Each structure stands twice: as C-alpha cells, then as structure tokens.
Image (spheres, rainbow, N blue to C red):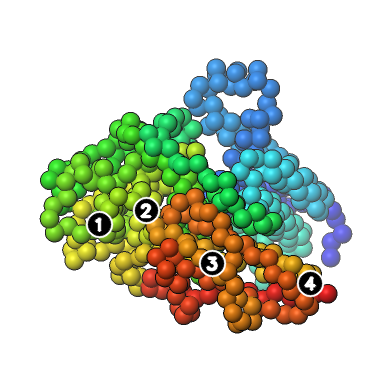
Amino acid sequence: MSSSEPGQARHDGGPRQAARAAAAAGIVAVGSAAVLGELLAGFFSPSLSPMTAVGGAVIDAVPPGVKDWAVAVFGTADKAALLVGMGLVMAALAALAGILEYRKRFAGAALIGVFGMVGLAAVLTRAQASANAAVLAVLTAVVAVLLLRFLIRTLREWETQALEPAPGAPPARRRFLQALAGGAVFTAAGGLLAGLWRGAAAVASEARSRVTLPVPASPAPAIPGDAEAGVDGMQPLVTPNKDFYRIDTALTVPAVDPATWVLKVTGLVDREVELTFADLLAKPLTERHITIACVSNTVGGDLIGNARWLGWPVRELLALAGPQAGADMVLSKSADGWTAGTPLDVLSDGRDALLAVAMNGEPLPLEHGFPVRLVVPGLYGYVSATKWVTELKVTRFADDVAYWTPRGWSERGPIKTSSRIDVPRPGRQVKAGTIMFGGVAWAQHTGIGRVELRLNRGPWRQADLAQGISVDTWYQWKLGVELTEGQYEVQVRATDLAGRIQDERSRPVVPDGATGLHTIRVDVTP
Ligand SMILES: Nc1nc2c(c(=O)[nH]1)N[C@H]1C(S)=C(S)[C@@H](COP(=O)(O)O)O[C@H]1N2
Ligand SMILES: [Mo]
C-alpha cells in the first residue's frame, strides 16, 4: 500500500484537480441531501422543509435595517433572493467541507455536522416546530455526510489506482465521475421540481397570510364551562391545528391561489352558480365547533379531531342553485381531482354543513384544504369533507361514483357512535387507590347521552359525562375507580341521545367504519 497522503498525489498522474474534485464532491453531497429533504417535505408537508425553517430563522435573526434593505432591493422577490443567497452560502460551505474531508477524514463531515446542528436549532425554534421536522433536518445532514464520505473515499481510490494501477480493479475514476454526475443531475432536476412546488406553495401561503377573516354572522356558541372533564393527560377539547390528523390522497399538498379559486355548482340544478373567494367571504358566515372523523379510524384510534370551523352553510349555496327533482347526491370535487359523494338531504336538512374557510380562527392550513373545504357534521370525511373544493355537482347516487366507492368503501358513510379511553395511557403503570379514567365519546349530530365503563367484564358503571359543546362535537367523560393491586381489562361504551348503545361487535374499518369496544389493560401496582 502507498503511504502517501492523498493530498500529495495531485501531481503524480492522479486526479490533477483533486481539490476541485473534492469541492465538487462536497457541493453534490450537500446539494443532493438538501434536495432530498425538500422533496420529502414536498411529499409530506411543506411545514417540514428544512430550507424554510433555516430561511425563517435567518429572517428572524436579521436586523430590521437589513430586512428593509432586502425588500428595497429585491422587492417581492426578497424571499427568492434569500433562498438563492442561502444556496450560495451552502454551496460555499459544502465545497469547503469537501476539501476538508479530502485533507483529513471526518473533517468535512464534522463541518456538515456543525451546520446540521445550526439547521436543527433553526427548525426547533420555529413556531411550527415538530418532531417530524427535526427528524427530516437530521436525516438531511446524515445523508449529506454519508454521500460526502462515499464520494471522497472514491476520489481517494481513484488516486491510489492512479499511483499503483491494479489490473482488473474497477476504475474508481469512472465511479467517482459517475456518482458526481448522478448527484449533480439529481440536485438540478430535484431542485427544479422542489422549486416549482415551493413557488406554488409560496403563492398560496402568501395569499393565506393576507386573508382577513370576516366576523361570523352566527358566532360559535360559547364552550360550556363544564365541557372539560378536567382529567390530566387528556387531549384538548378543541384540537390545535398543528395536531389535527391529516388524511388525503394528495401526493403533494395542492397549492390553490384564492385569487383564482372559483367554486362551481353544476349538474341537476335550475341555475349553475359560480362563487369566488371574495364572494364567499362576503356571505353571512356561521362558526361552529364540529368534530370530524376518518372512516379509517380504528376503535380507540386518533383519526378524529374537533375544531372551530367558519364557513357558509352549504344549504344556502344549494338553495341559490335550486336542485332539481330526482337529485339525491352532491359530488364534491377537489382541485386535485379527488371526489366525495354526500347525500343531498344531509346537506339540506338544516345541520351546520359548511363551506369552511377557517379552522380555529385561522384561514385553513394548506394541508387542511386552503382556501375552502367542506365540513359536514355526522359523516365520515371520505363522503363529505372535501378539501381544496372546486365544484359541487348535484347528481344522483345512481349516476355518479365518488373516489372511494369503487375502492371497496361504502357509498354512504354516517359516523358510528364510539368512545375512547385516553387516561390512563396504555401501558402506563398506576398505583393502587382511586384511579381516574378519562376519554371522549362521539355521536355526531345526535349527541352523547351516557358513557359507561366496565372492569374485567363486570357490570357497567356510569361515568361522569361532561357537557358537549354541541351534539356535533365529541364529549369528554371521566370516572374515578377505587382499585387494588392487579391486572384489569377496562372497556368503555357510549349511548347516544336517542338511546342507542354503540355497536359492541368488533368490525374492521372497511367498508364503512370500525365498531367494537375500546379495551385497555391497566396494571395496578401496590
Ligand atoms: N381533496 C381531498 N379531500 C379530502 C380527502 C382527500 O383525500 N382529498 N380525504 C378525506 C378524508 S378520508 C378525511 S378523513 C378528511 C380529513 O380531513 P383533515 O385532513 O383536514 O383532517 O378529509 C377528506 N377530504
Ligand atoms: Mo378519512
């Protein structure tokens, strides 16, 4: 083996421009990793983007004078200029990391590590900081280090082979150049794609930040003082937007510009109607707490959330259009082509089915359907809660089929009455004495009348049921039970305000929602 330091090989027939090759390796490694991070953020949620987090932190850290200067020079392109500037700084650091790694193993990796930590700090200080965003930032840095290590190792092999040509050995030169070219193409193509997404998402986010929500004509009734059961460790009665479950088929979050958004009412109607976002905001809006749930929510699962929605009642829009005799379904279409089929009578029967523009006092988050979505009390999301909605086609179940129907899910999807134990948390050990159980129960649009708990299949005991915000929301409940050491199986069941007990038979989520009793095991220690 040659004992020469890699750096000395430069003039001996190895890669002549070793430092330049190492710098290129650094740029390609960091570029590929950063683009991968942006593409993953594009797929899952724009709020995870490491570049956005770092850019946001830079904006927050920069003195106001510099900000004013940037706006004066770049105008509305100031964000784009910031991203380009960040790209240049990253490229320079990446080149340096490449050269350092080439001179001394792990030196470049260490530099990337340091900047990965800075990036992670930026992610964690953001208002939307989440564990997933932190994971993505760390993943990006790890991928950058691995790629850099691989490229520099191959570069060194190239040199070694140039010094001591080994017949039959795979030419490292070719491998290095191929990997470099492949990474460069990925960075360029992926970067372009991520840039286009980001551009569209930026337009939508900008527009979202400029929306002024009107004061509701019919405000949400105040939450009753005794709607919270007051048990430690329960989920909040109103789910914060950032914790709200998200389900959709959208590979990338549709970025809809409210300036060009229109909602069309078509099909079996006397008059087709078109509504702009401005038209919608000018209507007398209704604000209500409504708990929506996914048909894929398993018994005890968390694909359910309660929010305060602001919107225009769908029945008023339908009344403008005038549905014709024979129509029994409204096929709502999303900007991304997804569809839901909702019974016309549910949308007309007076319940608060809304064309919602806001969630918990904010314009809809992009992931939750900005600028406009449907929210229908009492129906699972897949047959009612169309996000990024663009059309309501009045039609008949016999003539039109919604997205999930041919995929094995029922045409109709009323939410099934169900209940859940949230406290004590599963697997948590509890001490003998009075143990506080707590959870939620829901029977949207009917309301909950009673919640009961049973231990080890004994008699049902009635829990303390908190007041619901309305019959369209979930209800919290609690029950303190005196327990001695031992193992307990605890089950909950709800009865709706019409006196119907929830279906106790265990059935899967397909085709129209799971049934059965949420059952937990509790270990009581002395
Ligand atoms: N455009 C569109 N809207 C959609 C869906 C979808 O896949 N695409 N999924 C629906 C389903 S199955 C559910 S449960 C709810 C979830 O709404 P959320 O993501 O705001 O919680 O959205 C509904 N609206
Ligand atoms: Mo769903």
Q: Give the answer, above or below, for where 335 lies relative to 3.
A: above
Q: Earlier in the sequence, mark 2 or mark 4?
A: 2
- Pick the front one: 40 or 99: 40
* Residue 113 x %, y %: 76, 48
Q: How far apart are marks 1 and 2 (CA)?
A: 12 Å
* Residue 420 x %, y %: 56, 66
Q: Mark 1 points at which residue?
A: 345
Q: Name the residue under label 2.
A: 376
The reply to whether callout 4 and callout 3 are in contact (CB within 8 Å) is no
Q: Give the answer, above or below, for where 279 lies relative to 231.
A: above
Which amino acid type corresponds to the residue marked 2 in the rendered image?
Answer: Val
Q: Earlier in the sequence, mark 1 or mark 2?
A: 1
Which amino acid type corresponds to the residue marked 3 in the rendered image?
Answer: Val
Label 4: which secondary element? loop
Which callout, 3 or 1, points to the residue nearer the camera?
3
Which amino acid type corresponds to the residue marked 4 in the rendered image?
Answer: Ala
Which callout, 4 or 1, points to the residue nearer the camera?
4
Q: Distance between the residues labelled 2 and 4?
A: 43 Å
Q: Earlier in the sequence, mark 2 or mark 3?
A: 2
Q: How far apart are marks 3 and 1 (CA)?
A: 30 Å
Q: Distance between the residues labelled 2 and 3?
A: 24 Å
**Relative horizontal placement of residue 446, taking residue 401 as reference (left or right):** right
Q: Earlier in the sequence, mark 4 or mark 3?
A: 4
- Pick the front one: 253 or 40: 253
* Residue 36 x %, y %: 57, 52
Which callout, 2 or 3, points to the residue nearer the camera?
3
Q: Name the residue under label 3.
A: 451
Crowding around mark 3 (Cα neighbors within 10 Å: few <14, some 14 to 19, many 20+) is many
Q: Mark 4 points at which residue?
A: 432
Q: Distance between the residues labelled 4 and 1?
A: 52 Å
Q: What residue is shown at x 64% (from left), y 49% (from top)?
A: 130
Q: Quadrant of the N terminus?
A: bottom right
